[in-house]
Image: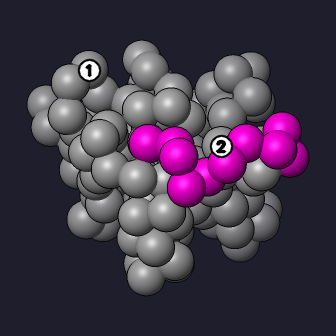
Amino acid sequence: MSQDSRVRADEVMSTPVETISKGASVTEAVQVMREHDIGALLVTSGPPGIVTSTDVLDAVAEGRDLSTLSVADLMTTPVETVPPELHLEEVAAMMTSLGISHLPVVDGDPVGMISSTDVTAQLSRSG
């Protein structure tokens, strides 16, 4: 595959980026993720962060009471991001080295979200 034909993050990212406030309840976050069939939300109030379905599952596994938690209680900040032109192989390497499965795609402002599922699906089609 030539350098110019490699798939970029902006070619497989989900758009628009779904966001939530850090003050929102975890229940609200789960509802938004289910409504949009996604596994992560960008937290835009205060320092940018991310909350994922894995964060929610970890809280459940720890026996935490979700009804008392806000997004701020579970979110990861600072959030790692990638530029739209980053090639998927590099996105995959970044996800692997950081142990994460979602990356906001940012071009000044957030323009999309890319997940490990997006990367895997595209690379399996390309390979």
Q: Is residue 120 above or below residue 4?
A: below
Instruction: Give the residue drawn at x 32%, y 50%.
Output: 24
Q: Which residues are magenta?
A: 61-70
Query: Residue 43 at x, y = what percent?
Result: 32, 40
Return the residue nearer the eye: 3 or 105.
105
Instruction: Give the residue drawn at x 31%, y 60%.
Output: 18
Return the residue nearer the eye: 82 or 6.
82
Q: Secondary structure at mark 1?
A: loop
The label on residue 47 is 1
Return the residue nearer the eye: 112 or 84.
112
In the displayed image of the protein, which residue is found farthest to the left? 108
Mark 2 and mark 1: Cα distance apart in space? 18 Å
Q: Secondary structure at mark 2?
A: helix
Instruction: Give the residue drawn at x 42%, y 32%.
Output: 72
> Of the residues shown, which amino acid type is indicated by label 2?
Asp
Return the residue nearer the eye: 114 or 46.
46
Q: Does residue 121 show up magenta in the picture? A: no
**Quadrant the C terminus occupies:** bottom right
